[in-house]
Image: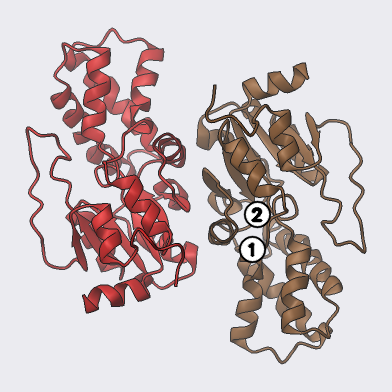
Chain colours: A brown, B red
């Protein structure tokens, strides 16, 4: 508890990973795909789409592709995926709409309440590989109350490039240890920690769907391990009754 | 009225100039300086500080200085200004605090209500030469409900560089004519119009203080000419009773 109070006193900015941490990409894609094509295995489709993400980013990071937004990477992966799922007949407008499902992802049930509480005490921002427009459209639809939307697009580098984690500290003119990354992924958190940021892990056991529950056991190294963003708010003293930073 | 309905139907994103348009830099600096050094002519000080802004940005745009944030340009100008106003004795902490007055500018009385109404119908974002951290801190303190903070810092170019105006359209994946710049400065609006954006002028007769009222007579070329941001909301059909985009 003493450590938590220390954290609450020294951390100024909470930067949130988005896909899987704040929003449920798997469940949202399954739902939309079921409406579009009920015969398709939405669970497999969602996981295959997401699985294309890291290799696509690696092509950018490795220089094979120039700077490319996630919207465009998602579309490249989608176009490759559709024939495998019997959806090669989708026309341009349908593909474009489906690709924008990443702008329409639903938050986990605790996300809006947790962020609203945390915002009273900290600056809350995104730190996602998603592009700015995607994150802004998502926030507007879902009611995510960001103080600021930061993205790989601002830093022209994808996580886990140190330029992204250190970029948050630079934007807000604070030291790296005054920024805490909140994420459901240990590799993201480890890269942030290597840059001097504080880290909080959030359990999202259903990130990949109920058929493939994720191991959310605590791992060493993180400053906090939380069940939800409401749990994070309570651990950092951003309770329901607070109306401002003390 | 028909034109206004057309605008309300085709415009998706409202991008706002900040200094002078949404917040009262002159009045805010006068107030803070009066508390710090009541013997100084705050009106002259505020105008001198602001007058250094364009020449400083020109040094960046012209390549004499590398990319520099407004926070750092403000500080360079401030350090040059203090001896002229008998304030050369201010120490580093005092200078740093005074320089951050640009993060603590107060909104005009209509700004929060106008933006809150407009946000129900449009995506509302900043488009300012101010840096991201400055704009985020200002918004958090003043309650400005941005969907997204865009800045010269995102585009690595200052207004009136076309990269800034066109950058807004690119971020949101819309056509330039689906973006409207809202500003109290005709030169900013003219540069946006040359890039294909819609434009709305906002009257801020006291931008430079009551001693130097500004000519706010309508000029040709703008799509709208408004007395305030509440007036803009009413002209664009974003009335007080609306709860969502139709």
Q: Position of residue A111 (x, y in %)?
A: 68, 48
Labels 1 and 2 in the same subunit? yes
Image quarter where the C terminus of chain B lies is bottom left
**Considering only vertical position in the picture, is B47 above or below B83?**
below
Which chain letter goes with mark 2? A
Callout 1–callout 2 Cβ contact below 8 Å: yes
Can you name the residue that lies furthest to the bottom here? Answer: A89
Query: SS at mark 2?
Result: loop
Judge whether residue A166 can be spotted in this image: no
Question: Residue B114 location, x and y as percent?
Answer: 32, 52
Q: Residues within 10 Å of mark 2 (few under 14, many from 20)?
A: many
Q: In the rendered image, which quarter is residue B54 located in?
A: top left
Image quarter of residue B143: top left
Q: Is residue B4 left or right of residue A202?
A: left
Q: Which residue is mark 1?
A: A70
Q: Which residue is mark 2?
A: A129
In the figure, A20 relative to A124: above or below? below
B47 vs A178, left or right, is left
Quarter containing the N terminus of chain B: bottom left
Q: Is residue B194 visible?
A: yes
Write down the chain letter for disc 1. A
Circle 1 — which element? helix
Q: In the image, is residue B97 above or below residue A80?
A: above
């Amino acid at each position: 508890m003493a450590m938590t109070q220390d954290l609450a006193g020294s951390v100024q900015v909470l930067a949130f990973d988005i896909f899987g941490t704040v929003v449920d990409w798997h469940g949202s894609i399954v739902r939309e795909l079921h409406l579009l094509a009920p015969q398709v295995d939405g669970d497999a489709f969602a996981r295959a789409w997401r699985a294309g993400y890291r290799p696509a980013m690696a092509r950018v990071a490795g220089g094979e592709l120039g700077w490319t937004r996630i919207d465009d990477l998602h579309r490249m992966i989608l176009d490759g995926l559709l024939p495998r799922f019997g959806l090669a007949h989708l026309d341009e407008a349908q593909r474009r709409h489906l690709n924008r499902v990443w702008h329409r992802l639903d938050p986990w049930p605790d996300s809006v309440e947790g962020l609203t509480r945390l915002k009273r005490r900290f600056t809350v921002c995104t730190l996602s590989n998603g592009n700015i427009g995607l994150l802004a459209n998502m926030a507007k639809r879902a009611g995510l109350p960001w103080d600021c939307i930061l993205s790989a697009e601002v830093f022209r580098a994808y996580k886990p490039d140190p330029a992204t984690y250190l970029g948050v500290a630079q934007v807000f003119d604070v030291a790296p240890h005054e920024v805490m990354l909140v994420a459901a992924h240990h590799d993201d958190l480890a890269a942030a920690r290597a840059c001097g940021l504080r880290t909080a892990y959030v359990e999202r056991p259903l990130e990949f769907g109920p058929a493939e529950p994720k191991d959310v056991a605590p791992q060493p190294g993180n400053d906090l391990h939380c069940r939800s963003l409401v749990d994070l708010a309570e651990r950092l003293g951003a309770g329901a009754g607070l109306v401002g930073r003390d």
